[in-house]
């Protein structure tokens, strides 16, 4: 009886510690303007949209800082490019005094080549031929919009709530109680 219960307790405690240690992440979402130059199956009603997730918010007053998102997804109207450990992407950002993105260079090369660039961020070259560009080249054609930056929004992904932590503790305690009850019935039947 004690052996089975004793084996369950460390697992329950480990689960609670992991959940309690989780921090809320920050999701950054980009909405580009409609493409102006298109070829192939792209249209001028399509645009570059996407998002990336960081474990914590961007710092204030960054200048051309390379960041490493835990996850990302970008969509060019036809193809979706997402975080792939074999292909990867490069992300450089600058922020203002509140941590809002003011300049960026994002280049992805998974399913499609996707680049979003605003104001150029060292060490990558400035966006050419204008200060801002969204470009994509795929098997479906090409599309771009120049000189018209998209917009960024950010949102905190909530941390686990106290309710979830209490629910997890209750489930673990219930599992221990059921285990003790089962063990007691099983032991008395012998």
Image (cartoon, rainbow, N blue to C red):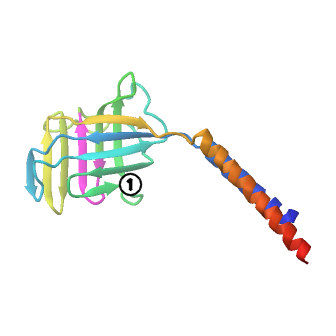
Residue 165 visible here: yes
Q: In this view, does 146 lie above or below 98?
A: below
Q: In this view, does 128 lie to the left or right of 69?
A: left
- Judging by the rendered image, the residue that carries numbered circle 1 is 83
> Which span of residues is magenta-colored?
107-118
Q: In this view, does 180 lie above or below 76?
A: below
Q: Where is residue 85 in the image (x, y as percent from the top left)?
A: 42, 58
Q: Is residue 184 left or right of residue 172?
A: right
Q: Chief secondary structure of the magenta span?
A: strand
Q: Position of residue 171 (x, y in %)?
A: 68, 54
Closer to us: 39 or 169? 169
Q: Does the magenta stretch include residue 116?
A: yes
Q: Quadrant location of residue 62? A: top left
Q: Where is residue 175 in the image (x, y as percent from the top left)?
A: 73, 59
Q: Residue at x 42, y 44 (%)?
A: 53
Q: In which quarter of the image is the C terminus?
A: bottom right
């Amino acid at each position: 009886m004690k052996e089975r219960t004793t084996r369950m307790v460390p697992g329950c405690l480990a689960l609670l510690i992991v959940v309690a240690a989780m921090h809320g992440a920050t999701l950054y979402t980009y909405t580009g303007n409609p493409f102006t130059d298109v070829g192939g199956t792209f249209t001028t009603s399509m645009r570059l949209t996407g998002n990336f997730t960081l474990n914590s918010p961007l710092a204030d007053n960054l200048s051309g800082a390379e960041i490493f998102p835990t996850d990302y997804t970008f969509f060019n109207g036809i193809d979706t490019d997402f975080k792939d450990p074999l292909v990867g992407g490069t992300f450089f950002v600058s922020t203002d005094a509140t941590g809002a993105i003011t300049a960026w260079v994002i280049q992805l090369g998974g399913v499609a080549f996707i680049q979003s660039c605003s104001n150029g961020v060292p060490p990558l070259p400035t966006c050419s031929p204008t200060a801002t560009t969204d470009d994509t080249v795929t098997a479906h054609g090409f599309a771009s919009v120049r000189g018209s930056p998209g917009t960024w929004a950010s949102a905190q992904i909530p941390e686990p709530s106290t309710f979830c932590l209490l629910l997890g503790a209750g489930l673990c305690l219930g599992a221990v109680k059921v285990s003790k009850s089962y063990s007691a019935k099983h032991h008395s039947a012998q």
